[in-house]
Amino acid sequence: MKRIILAAALCLAALPARADRVRPVTDPETLAACGECHMAFQPAFLPARSWTRMMGQLSGHFGDNAAMAADKAERIRQVLVAGAADTGGGKAGSKALRGVGQYDTPQRITELPRFAAKHQRIAEREWKRPEVTSKANCPACHKAAEAGLYDDD
Ligand code: HEC
Ligand code: HEC
């Protein structure tokens, strides 16, 4: 028992050291709706204006149809906007916005300058591996991506 408590205490102590933790999605409705086809991406990776644009065109979502009832879309938009890079995104958010124009509304995290910079050492064939297939498949390489941890490699 004592050992378990000690282990738990050590885990807790290790958490604050994860300075780059990206706040994960916790809202159940957003998790369910935006985690259906891919992981629920952390709002801190895109600015608020990007999320608003995305939520306004869900029937044409990267070649897919992610449409939902308008009131639900609006609730989810608010969750995303509250945690966006330029609102509640904290340190991870300001990093994500590096090199993004003030009025740009990027839709892909994987096309941000920050993403390119952090992944420049990854060879083209890595992205094409059958267990990866897309840059957007964060959890294929970052086992704790959904918990907002990316400095695990
Ligand atoms: C019906 C399936 C589906 C649903 C539901 C869905 N998406 Fe997507 N989404 C996709 C597909 C397909 C892509 C493109 C994936 C790829 O390029 O590998 C994508 C890509 C994305 C990307 C860009 C990833 C990148 O390349 O950086 C974001 C951001 C995103 N979705 C957010 C959302 C949000 C927010 C929701 C909830 C409102 C949502 N998605 C719901 C299918 C879906
Ligand atoms: C093919 C595997 C792969 C995929 C897919 C991938 N990454 Fe990475 N990512 C890496 C590797 C490897 C590193 C470390 C690179 C280095 O240190 O040079 C990294 C680094 C990062 C970092 C920087 C971590 C730090 O603390 O410096 C972030 C943030 C990140 N990835 C986010 C993402 C997100 C978000 C996605 C999905 C949209 C994603 N990655 C998809 C392999 C991947």
Image: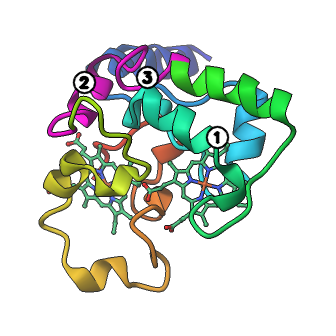
Identify the element where label 2 is drawn. Answer: helix
Residues under numbered marks 3 and 2 in contact, where contact means CB atoms less than 8 Å apart: no
**Amino acid bearing label 1:** Gly
Q: Is mark 3 within 8 Å of ligand 2?
A: no
Secondary structure category for the residue under label 3? helix
Residue 56, which numbered label? 1
Residue 90 lies in the magenta stretch: yes
Where is mark 3, residue-wise?
Answer: 11
Residue 29 percent across, percent down from the top left: 79, 31
Numbered disc in front, either 3 or 2: 2
Which is nearer the N-term, disc 1 or disc 2? 1
Q: Determine whether, in the image, residue 134 is placed left or right of residue 60.
A: left
- Relative placement, left or right, of 39 versus 117 is right
* Residue at 68 percent of width and 67 percent of height: 64
Q: Nearer the viewer, mark 1 or mark 2?
A: 1
Magenta stretch? 82-100
Amino acid type of the residue that numbered disc 2 sits on in the rendered structure: Ser
Name the N-terminal-most of marks 3 and 1: 3
Toward the viewer: 137 or 141? 137
Crowdedness near tag 1: few (<14), some (14–19) or many (≥20) residues, C-alpha within 10 Å: some
Neighbor class of circle 2 (other Cα within 10 Å; few <14, some 14-19, many 20+) is some
